[in-house]
Amino acid sequence: MEITEIMRHLPHRYPFLLVDRVLELVPGEHVVAIKNVTMNEPHFPGHFPHHPVMPGVLIIEALAQAAGLLAFKTADKPVTENTVVYFVGIDNARFKRPVVPGDQLRLEARITKSMRGIWKFAARALVDGQLACEAELMCTLRDLD
């Protein structure tokens, strides 16, 4: 899935769209996506000026966006301007290594449970095969009024 299709499914735009490409997506199972980390991102001048590190909350957000894409494809709903995916929960988040400009985050999410329109995912972000972050995430799809 390339960026134009990603943008059809996620409402996020620059500077908050954090998924650049989907390498693999099996509805009802898992997703593998990529986030290229560049020095041009707006958070790096302040986090930190002499040692740029991607904020952990943005790594989690990138994982949630990848999981949201999997939720959209699993639900097999028509994509409209009125359908959004909400990040509704996080458990057991752990950060294992810093993510810096030049890194490529491999975002992986696997559905572990689905009940009443809420999906639970086991998610992890890797850089060069090394675990950078892992968490359990929850997302839901909602139609805006």
Image (tube, rainbow, N blue to C red):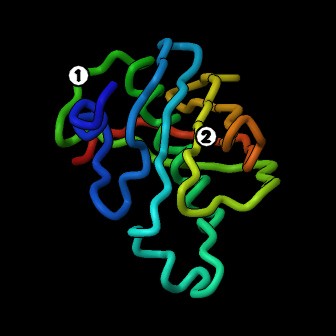
Residue 140: image x %, image y %?
48, 37
Please report whichever mark, 1 or 2, sits nearer to the chain's N-terminal start.
1
Q: Nearer the viewer, residue 41 or 65?
A: 41
Relative side of 105 to 20, left or right? right
Residue 9: percent from the left, percent from the top? Answer: 29, 35
Q: Secondary structure at mark 1?
A: loop
Compared across the picture, whether 117 is left or right of 47 comes to left
Quadrant (top left, top right, bottom left, bottom right) of the N terminus: top left
Q: Quadrant of residue 138?
A: top right
Q: Is residue 77 above or below residue 59?
A: above
Q: Nearer the viewer, residue 139 or 12?
A: 12
Q: Give me the residue at 52% from left, 49% from top.
A: 62
Q: Are marks 1 and 2 in contact (CB under 8 Å)?
A: no
* Disc 2 packing (10 Å; few <14; some 14–19; many ≥20): many
Instruction: Identify the residue at horizontal 55%, vertical 46% (top origin).
Output: 104
The type of residue carrying mark 2 is Met
Which residue is labeled 1 in the image?
78
Query: Mark 1: which amino acid?
Result: Pro
Identify the residue position indicated by label 2 in the image.
138
Query: Image point 30% across, 30% down: which residue?
Result: 2
Label 1: how many residues lie within 10 Å, few (<14), some (14-19) or many (20+)? few
Q: Is residue 131 left or right of residue 69?
A: right
At x 46% / y 36%, what residue is drawn? Answer: 68
Task: Tell me residue 15's x, y (percent).
Answer: 34, 64
SS at mark 2?
Answer: strand
Q: Vertical placement of 99 versus 137: above or below?
A: below
